Amino acid sequence: MTPHDQSANGDPAFAAQASVEVRDASVWFGQKVALSELSCSFGPGVTGLLGPNGAGKSTLMRAMTGLIGVNTGAVRVAGRDPRTDRDVHRRIALVPEDEAVPARLTAHELVAYVADLHGVGELGAVDRALTSVDLLPVADRRLGGFSKGMRQRAKVAAALVTDPAVLVLDEPLNGADPIQRLALIELFRRLGSDGRTVIVSSHVLSEVERLADRVLVLINGRLAAAGNHRAIRDAMDDRPRHVLVRADDQRRLASALLGVDTVAGVSVTGAGLVVTTERAGDLAVALAPAARRLGVRLLEVRPLDDSLDSLFRELVR
Amino acid sequence: MASIVCARGLTKRYAGVTALDGVDLDLPAGRVGLVGANGAGKTTLFRLLLGLSRPDAGTVEVCGMAVSDDPAGVRSRIGYMPEHDCLPLDQSAADVVATFGELGGLPVRAARQRASEVLDLVGLDEARFRPVGGFSTGMRQRTKLAQAIVADPRLVLLDEPTAGLDPSGREEMLTLVDRLGSFGIAVVLATHLLDDVARVCDHVVMLDAGRLVTDAPTTSLLHQTGAVTVDVGPTGAVALAAALVARGLDVTTSDVGTIEVTVPGETELDIVRDVVADLGLPLHKLTNRLTSLDDVFAREAPPR
Amino acid sequence: MSDPGRAGAVYDRGYRPYDGPLGGRPAARFALYRTSLRRAVGLRRPWRQKVAPAVLLAIAVIPAVINVGIGYVTRDTPAEGFEFITYREYVGVSSALLLFVALVGPDIVCPDRRQRVLPLIFARPLTGADYVLAKVGAIFTCVFAFSFLPQVVLFVGQMLVSDGALDYLGRHAAVLWQVPLAAAALALFYAVLGVAAASLTGRRMVAAATLLGITLVTSSVAGIIVETGSGGGAGHPAALLDLLSLPLQVRDLVFLGRLHEDSSLSGVTGGGAMAAACYLAVVAAGLAVMLHRYRSVEA
């Protein structure tokens, strides 16, 4: 069980041992309300931040790192206000999405510059940061010659050089090739299990599933859902679940399944039986015994809406 | 079926870097995914296909025409959707797409007609009369796709068409790409997202350091491993594993609470079913463990 | 049994192939020329973009109108064919034309580079040379029109106001080929310079400043050298440096067959030939710059 599952008051919007707290925060730019009375918190481990474009993810990230202020409510990092407290900037680092890096600098120079900026005096901090993103071998090459994925890693190294407790990353996998993506995912997981608070936003939901134990979904500046994505799906009990069941005798199994109380319907499709149920748990418990009783071989059982993709689609609908 | 792209010994070097090294390709007309480390190979390949660069060695043919013989002629049969922002911001989408239709050789009236049709296809309704400068990423991507197909190309080259799109936008774009295939337009989709390739492409080409490492139909790459993944929820996993081992099955527990069971034949599936029923566990998931494209990529193009 | 397939059919699944004519490279080139010209003149664009060409046209036509007007008003007085402005002088309303080219040239060229539209354009059946031809052609057309149309107004007006129209036509027949040729030479010069300057950068302001800077600086420098070198009277070879004057020298060659007395080159031996040579050199250099800038595009 990760610390996330044991949140302070049972509400998955809040993390245990929270390092970043957001309380009733609202941010507006003229008429546009970017965040609307948002309350949540983040703690050690990797948290995914999801939402459609324009939902407020970048705004939240900038508010957490003190780049913008909140109009009402409060944001606290380790108990301090990132907008006013300069000290906070050594504890929380942001890797923004599309910011260009100066092409003339080498990777080493960029990280060293950021280290100087924050007064990181420790020798070897730069090299350590570069090693953690696997850029030490090419540290003396200019950023202009880097691929997009390598530039991303350089930015992450610059963020890591202050050894922050909180790392906020806006679409960090953008432009990375498949190998780099896997390497970055592994890096972020490692940073999370080291006890850092890692907050990652991404549109590639299958990667967020691999990366984050906990997700927060923002829609229209409000918190739409929080927690483990399977648990969220279960919590959406007003929407029926769909499960694909493939067996060697579909029709007999179909009749038996219709006898289960919470099964609302069974469709026979080319790919197998699609069972619609109000409670996925009841179906799961009934499945193996029913098949055994009939002597039917189960070939495949697969929830069709289990992924973050389908959850997201349901939420955004 | 004739190949839509045919290359032999294709080589291109830039300033000391070998972007393509003696590559042989026979891409079928369909939906081909192009994946590669660092992107250098794919951009170069696109430029060579469009006749905007000349290869240092080797030949390439598109739609049966040798590119070096008539680059402009080849280009009249290809549509291109770049990754970066490339639309004139002060014109409306309808204007932009119609203009690019004319630039592709369509007569003025036909260009306007086709622009209207392809904008319908990509789902830009009243927005098409507004300047592109005010468009969201999703709308810009759709406009870019529209200009690529307005002159009825035989082949479209799509460079990261889902970049910057949120999940619903990505889903819509992939659906569009899927439909292009069904309209008889061959697609080469260059992307870093292997999920997109698995979802949409029937053929996969992988490049690494300028060399071709894979050129195969998608289905042949995603094959079954002779193992199944079983999910009975976190609390029951340990008990299930123990019981299956006791029945002589080969079991490994993953770190997300699921179990993998080696299934040499289908009778082992019945054992799993029976044990789950005996223990009264909820059977949430029972799936064949397929190699994913990630596995293929990691195997063929390992990090250096 | 009837064929069930004929009872209903689906015609349109969202996409129709195109089976009409495809023009290929010539059609693409002309289309680029046409759209660039449209943009230059401000068609299909907000009113702000139409101001510059409209003002220029007005400035260009006013002298013609005045001339014809005065001629009409004084037609009964015995004054011999009064000419407020000669056809020769009328070719080359320099400052207005220069400003127009500095404004509109970058406007049709720089955004293609700045907004990275070039890769899309070159993914069409077009080459770099086609692009140059189309853009230069568009500016040429504008400048030529703005030089030529007022001349038509002047000529027709004079013809109507004079005592005998056909007589006037006979006396001034040479003008009918001199004006178009001189105007074309002027238009080509400006078009090449303007588009060449614009091809250097993606920023319209920078391109405009570059164009104005080069022309005005060379003009001033040449002027100073000519003044100090020749003591204010005769011409001086340094006048060849004055870019703005080169098309005017060519104009004089067309109208008079030689340099004009007042030209800053007068009295320089072989001045006419040198002026023509410099003109061609500048045009060639401009074309070379443009072809270089558009020879290879990042796809």
Image (cartoon, coloured by chain):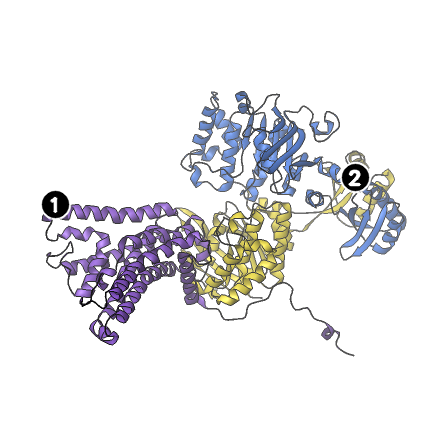
Q: Say which of B99 and B257 sits in front.
A: B99
- Residue B171, horizontal then vertical, whole percent: 64, 50
The percent position of residue C198, horizontal first and vertical second, equals 35, 51
C287 shown above or below C171: above
Given the image, on which type of amino acid does mark 1 rest?
Thr
Q: Which residue is mark 2?
A: B232
Q: Which residue sits furthest front?
A: C76
Q: Is residue A8 left or right of residue C58?
A: right
Disc 2 marks a residue whose amino acid type is: Val
For label 2, the SS is loop
Residue A173: mark: none
Chain painted in blue in the figure: A
User: Which colour denotes chain C?
Assistant: purple
Colour of chain B in the image: yellow
Q: Position of residue B15 (x, y in %)?
A: 38, 47
Q: Is residue C148 above or below residue A246?
A: below
Which of the pair C30/B285 is nearer the observer?
A: C30
Distance from Cα at disc 2 to Cα at disc 1? 99 Å
Quadrant for the N terminus of chain C, please.
Answer: bottom right
**Residue under pointer 1:** C228
